[in-house]
Every structure is written in C-alpha cells, then in structure tokens.
Amino acid sequence: MTTTPINLLSEEQLAEISSGKHWSFHGGIHPQENKQQSSKAIIKDAGIPPFLVIAVEQKGESPLLLVNIGDSVLKGQALTKATDVMVVQNASSSGTVTAIEKRTDLHPSGLPVLSVVIATDGLDRSVEYSRCADYKAQTNTQLIEKIQNAGIIGLGGAGFPTHLKLAHYAAIKLLIINAVECEPYITADDRLMQEHGDEIIDGITVLQHILKPQLIVIAIEDNKPDAIAAIKRALQKKQSSQSANIIIRTIATHYPSGSEKQLIEIITGQQTPIGKHPSELGIVMHNVGTVFAIKEAIIDGKPLTSRIVTLTGEAFRKKGNVSVRIGTPIQYLLDKYEFTPTASQKLIIGGPMMGFSITHGDVPVTKTCNCIVAPTLQEMPESPPEMPCIRCGECAEVCPAQLLPQQLLWYANSKDNSKLDEYNLSSCIECGACAFVCPSHIPLVQYYRIAKAEISSAKQQAEKAEIARIRFEHRAARLQQAKLDRQVKHKQAAEKRKQQLQETNGGEDLIAAAIARAKAKKQATADPSDAPADNKKDAVAAAIARAKAKKQAAAEHSDAPADNKKDAVAAAIARAKAKKQAAAEHSDAPADNKKDAVAAAIARAKAKKQQALESTQINTEINPENSAAIAARKARKEQARLHKRQDLPAQIIDTTIAEPQTIDTTIKASDDKKTKIAAAIAKAKAKKIAQKDQ
C-alpha cells in the first residue's frame, strides 16, 4: 500500500527539536510507579519449558505451515512462510512437533488460535546463524526481507509488523526510538538499555541505513537514570559522522507519554491527524526492544525467539526481568519464580493501566507480553462497585486524545455506532486514564473495547456483504455478455451459411426446402387415412343414437318383456314390504323377514340381468359381427356362475353356440330355472322355520 507523505515537519521544526525544545500533550495522570520491585535485578534466562505453544495465526489469517506433526525442529527454524503482511514464526527451542491445533491465545478475547505445539528435548539446538559482515552492502529490500523472516514485530505491546513500518522508507525525516516505558510496574526496557546499550545503538544504525532520516531521537523518561547513562555511554563509543544526528531526549514522567501519538506530540509539538499513520507524516517510531531484535536479526542472523518479560507483584517471591522463550506456558514461569496465590488473586498481563487479567496460567507467552503482574489484595485492592455517572468531567480532563469519555460511554451502552464514530471512538488509545480518575468507578475502557469489537465485526460483515454483492453483479454481467456473444455468434454463423448457400446453390436453402417437402408429404399421407376413422366414429354414434331411441320408444309404447319383468319385480318388492310390515305388526316370526330378503335378492338379480340384456342389444346393433360372440360369452359366464352356486348339471352350459338366435332361449331357460330354484329354497326355509316354531 502506498501513501502520500504529508511531511508536517519543516526544516525549522527539525532544528527546534535538535535544539532540545520539547512540548507536552493534553491530560495525563501520575499513577504510582512500583518499578523498584524489578528494576534492580539483572536479566536472567527463564530456562527451557517441557513444551512450547507457538501461535502462528496472525490477525485472524492462517499462515502456510512448513512443518507437520512428528517433525523434529531446531531453535530458530521457520515454522511458517512469510506473506505480504505476515511475519515468519520461528521455533523457540529444539524438539518435536506434537500437535498443530487451536490453543487459547494470550489476548483479552481469550479466543483460540492456530498453534504449533513443540515437545522440547532440553538441548536447545539451533540452526546455523549466518552473520552479516557488512549489511550496508545490501539493499533496503533485502534487509527488510530479513527482518520479516526473523519474525520481528513491535515489542512495545501493539505488535505491528516491523517490516511494514520500514516499507515507507522514502521521505522519512524523523526516527523516534521509544524507550519511555511509562506503564507502572514494567521495567523490561529499562533493564535492556542498562545491559545491552551497545547492541541498541547498533540496531539504531541499521534503521538509520534503511530509512536515512534527517534526525533520530531516543526518548527516555527521567525516572530511568541508569538507562539514560548506559545509552549515553554506548552512543559515545559510536562517535562517527552517522551518530551526529542521534540525540537523547529526556522527558518528564507523565502517563501515557509512551503512547505513539502522545510521544510524537511531545517530541515535535504536532498532533497526528485522525486516520493518519505516522509514516505518512514523515515519522517512524520503534520500541527499544524492537531495535535490539533488529540488530540480532541483521548483524547476528538470529530470528526473534525470546523476549524480556518483567515478573513483578507481591505474590512473586522471586521478582525481576527474565529472558523468556516465545511459547513458554505462563504456568511454568509461575512455578519457577515461586508464585504464591492468595484469595481473589489476580494475574495481569501487561500492566495495571493498559493490561488485562487472566484466570489461569495455561496460556503461552507471546511476542507482545512484556510483563506479568501478580499483586496481592493489599497491594491492589478490589475495585469498588460501579455506580452511575455523575457527569463530573474528570475523565475528559485527563483524556490524552481529547475525547469525551462520558459521551462515548452512553453511546457504547446504547450501541449507537454512528454516534461512536462521530465522537471518534477509534482515536481512543485505551490508556485507562479516564477509568483511573472516575469517582463512580466505571470501567470505561472495558466498555470501549467491547464497542470497538462490535464495530469491527459489523464492518467485517458489511465488507463481506459488499464483496458478495459485487461478485453477484459481476456474475450477472458475465452471463449477460455470454448470452449476447452467443447471439452474435449464431447470427454470424447464419449469415455465413447463407452466403455459402448462395455461392453453391444459387441462393437456395436446401435444408429449408427438404423440411418443407417432408411436411407436405406428411400432410398428403395423413388426409386419406383419416376417412375410415371418421366413418367408424359416425357409425358408432349412429348405433348408439338408435339404441337410445329404441329404448325410449319401448318405455313409452311397447309391452316389452323387460318392462313386464320390471313391473313384476316392483310388485313383488311391494308385496314383500307389505308382508314384512304386517308381520312386524302381528307376528314375531323371523321367517317372513328371511323371505322378504330372498325376494329382494331375486329382484336385484333380475334387474341386473335385464340391464345386461339391454347392453347386449345395444352392442348387437352397433357391431352385428361381434354381437353373437359377446352374447355367447356372457351366456357361458352366467351359466357357469349358476352351475357353481346352485350345483346345476353341467349339461346346461352349452360351450358351442352356433346361432345368435339361441341366446334369448338360453337366457330365458336359465331365468326360469333360477326362479324355480329360488322359490324352492324359500319354501324349504319357510317350512323349516315353521317346524321350528311348532
């Protein structure tokens, strides 16, 4: 990403800075320092823990891993591959990779991140480091790439990748080395300057070669006299033409003077505009610990595998600053330096002002962990209960960013993101000065952190939605363009075919002519074939009409046997009903009921048979050729049924019917026999019932 430098610093301002003039910033506080607990002891090696948990995921991005489970690794070996914005993660000691999984990270969110777990072998074997005899012979790009491969980030707490800060090396006028360390309890940078002043000056000369600034300022608070003296001695040893523009600036102890924007204002008198990075102003700032890591990476060839951590607080029996390997479990440090927890014990990572608390030691030390505070309850009492805001305005008086904390609190509670943006919540550096002076004991910084996280999540969702919308629109445009291309292609093909036909056949379309001939032939063959079908349909319709007319005439004027039979059946049914009614009134004999049921069944059978005869008559008129066969088949079926149900002799079933005229005779004979049989059955049942009654 390229930016356009604003270069707020003029030559006159640089001259004022060189002369020793300094400025101040708005607000700020003076909390109790408590630095004497750890500032007097020299830096010691914390040792090799049984295992290391090295987080390789950065800013939510998963890197390309270079190791697998079961691989043996050496100290300094690369575990991941560098990308544009991500640095390389290196092994902190030798051992075997036992797991690659998500583990809880040392972060206020407590979310798990992808990590490489290494079971150490205790030998601390390292890769062969290649020292650089003359780094000035290399280009800036090569040096910045080495810094990225060494895994160096800002060790002051922010964790911003160092190679990204150095990428804008053009038009840099001022380089500031941040050695202020204003947070209470922390003395890691203080001891580092006291013991490694020469290496820090070497790291500054490397940055001077890359950035080529007009002025370099080493800013140290006046509460570190030993560190100031050590840096002055180291600078005097490096007397050269290049060290002429390096000055040491002692500033007043005033929290949060170590914050980037506030320190720039102290050194230059200029405020960093909202939304601008210092590199856009011609200014680059690096922490003193980062400078020491750059020296080791460029001159000694060592990647960043450990850092200085302050162990302090009355709950530690052994206090001081230790060199801790990245990925060391915090519980290992607590056990080794005799941590004795008390009731309601707190563990603070970073410092009491800008740090955060953890509830257990099952998290690893990261590159941004510069201090572990374990205070007793007497040393750091519990905060009183939160009370409503009284609008005293103390928080606004001490805010170094000149914000309105009470307004931000209300909008954070109401989740009014537009108002939070209007009141510049993003400019809050989370220094904790507002909460420190609040008489209502409101944890303002916690509310701001939650609001920032919600705003960031909402922005990410909006960005994803916008990306999805753009992708959808591009896809729709591609489909539309593809459709237009196909239409043009088909049109061109048709024109080309037409031109070819004109050239070969005199303009006649042979395909269209063939299709037309085929359609005409099909039409011609279809017309004659429809006549027989129409004649057959007409004949069937006429036969049905004649049958219906005949049936109607028979119903009105004829004495057809069918009507007589119907009348007889109806009369029989009426007599049966009357007899049943009389029996129901004067007698309880069940015989009449059974007789009536038999009579009704016989009547239904006759009616069904009559319908069959009428249907046969209609079929005969419609198709005389097949009527005889149909009638014969029905007669055989009826006789077989009667034979089966009434045990009739087999001779009744005539399997060969030569003439259609015999159908009526056979059916009538069958009806007479059926009637006689039914009457006999009814008489037998009546006689049996009468005998039973007697």
Image: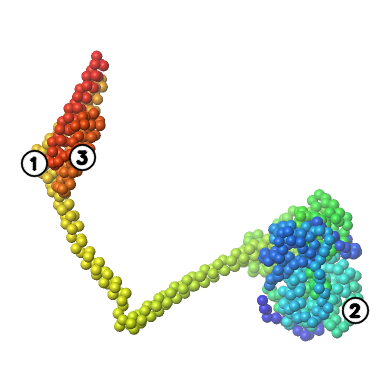
> Left or right: where does residue 663 sit relative to residue 333?
left
From the top left corner, tell me how far across and down residue 333 is, in percent.
Answer: 83, 57
What is the quadrant of residue 672 in the picture? top left
> Dot 2: what SS?
helix
For residue 614, above or below residue 77: above
Q: Mark on residue 43?
A: none
Q: What residue type is labelled 3?
A: Lys
Residue 373 seen anywhere in this rendered image of the structure? no
Q: Could you tell whether 26 is left or right of 42 in the image?
A: left
Give yes or no for contact between labels 3 and 1 (Cβ–Cβ under 8 Å): no
Q: Where is residue 570 in the image (x, y as percent from the top left)?
A: 17, 33
Q: Residue furthest top?
A: 694
Please name whichever residue, 541 or 413, is drawn nearer the observer in this view of the structure: 541
Determine the image quadrant of residue 115. Answer: bottom right
**Helix, strand or loop status at disc 3:** helix
Mark 2 crowd level (few <14, some 14–19, many ≥20, 10 Å Cα) = few
Q: Residue 236 carries which label?
A: 2
Q: Up-down: is 645 above or below 202?
A: above
Residue lying at 84% horizontally and 73% vertically, measured from the top left:
200
Which residue is identified by label 1?
557
- Find residue 634 and name its label: 3
Label whose residue precedes the other's in the sequence (2 or 3): 2
Q: Please give the name of the residue rendered at 12% of the width and 36% of the height, measured from the top-left corner.
A: 561
Mark 2 or mark 1, whichever is nearer to me: 1
Q: Nearer the viewer, residue 52 or 552?
A: 52
Residue 272, position in %: x, y? Answer: 72, 75
